[in-house]
Amino acid sequence: MATAATVKAAPGRVAPDLARPGRARPDLGRLVMVPLAVVMLLLDVVALTRGGGLDPLRLLRTAAICAFYALIIWCYLRRAPAIATSGSFTAYAAAVVATLTPFAFPLLPAGLPGAGQQLAGDALVLAGTAWAVWSLRFLGRNLSVIAQARDVVDRGPYRLVRHPLYAGEIVSALGLALCVGTVAAFAVWLALCGLQGYRALREEQVLLDALPGYRGYRARTAALLPGLF
């Protein structure tokens, strides 16, 4: 895999992120994401322990979300230093907005989804979150909200698609939109799809420039759906 000597920064796209000998740079992503994930995990644990009136599917959904945040904490606490980081402000903004967008669904005025629609929404949230948990398990020390390069991950769901974590988030967000059941919710979901697509493109610019092994992996692996794109 790439070392510091193999990194070639592309003007305006990738900034080498090489620490000076003897000076440890603080991991700002870890400082932000770990406390945030801890808060979200605690809230979901409380919801899980007080969920006596919830149906089994909702309980499974909440348990999967708890596992998701627990893995985020684990990944950030263990993650390796970045080899390169995107220098694009728009890439930063898209990554942050895409990360925060799912939290907007509970704030939207809810419609009147039928029992079947609610069931489908809960099932999609569970499926998408479970897929995202599987993705995080293999992404491990390479997790980052903003576009950064650390290593080429090609195991687990990454054998099938290059961005399984984004795919899982898109599926779970569709479930949230179904549960809200309004046009506004589906508009937010479509905006999230666009943000995740743009985010993936900018991330791949960093990976192609910084990791020699990524080009071959990209050539043989689909982006979000096996066999497509």
Image (tube, grey):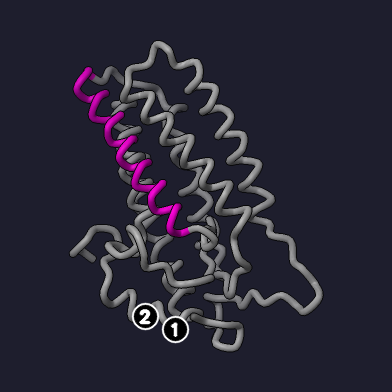
Q: Quadrant of the C terminus?
A: bottom left
Would residue 79 be seen by someone viewing this image from the given angle? yes
Could you tell me how far apart the alpha carbons at marks 2 and 1 are, in whole angstroms? Answer: 6 Å
Which residue sits furthest top?
Answer: 53
Q: Position of residue 77 (x, y in %)?
A: 63, 53
Does 173 sit left or right of 137 as displayed? left
Q: Position of residue 119 (x, y in %)?
A: 24, 25
Q: Main secondary structure of the magenta part?
A: helix
Q: Amino acid at mark 2?
A: Arg
Rendered position, 57 above or below 137? above
Rendered position, 209 above or below 87? below
Q: Position of residue 220 (x, y in %)?
A: 26, 75
The residue carrying mark 2 is 215
Does 117 sit left or right of 194 as displayed? left
Numbered range of the magenta stretch: 114-139
Task: Determine the secondary structure under disc 1.
Answer: loop
Rendered position, 69 above or below 91? above
Crowdedness near tag 1: few (<14), some (14–19) or many (≥20) residues, C-alpha within 10 Å: some
Crowdedness near tag 2: few (<14), some (14–19) or many (≥20) residues, C-alpha within 10 Å: some
- Decide which of 137, 143 is in the foreground and name it: 137
Task: Determine the secondary structure under disc 2.
Answer: helix
The residue carrying mark 1 is 212
Q: Tell me what residue is drawn at x 33 percent, y 17 percent.
A: 55
Which residue sits furthest bottom?
Answer: 5
Residue 189 is inside the magenta segment: no
Residue 138 is inside the magenta segment: yes
Q: Position of residue 168 (x, y in %)?
A: 34, 48
* CB under 8 Å between discs 2 and 1: yes
Q: Tell me what residue is drawn at x 53 percent, y 41 percent.
A: 70
Would residue 186 be seen by someone viewing this image from the given angle? no
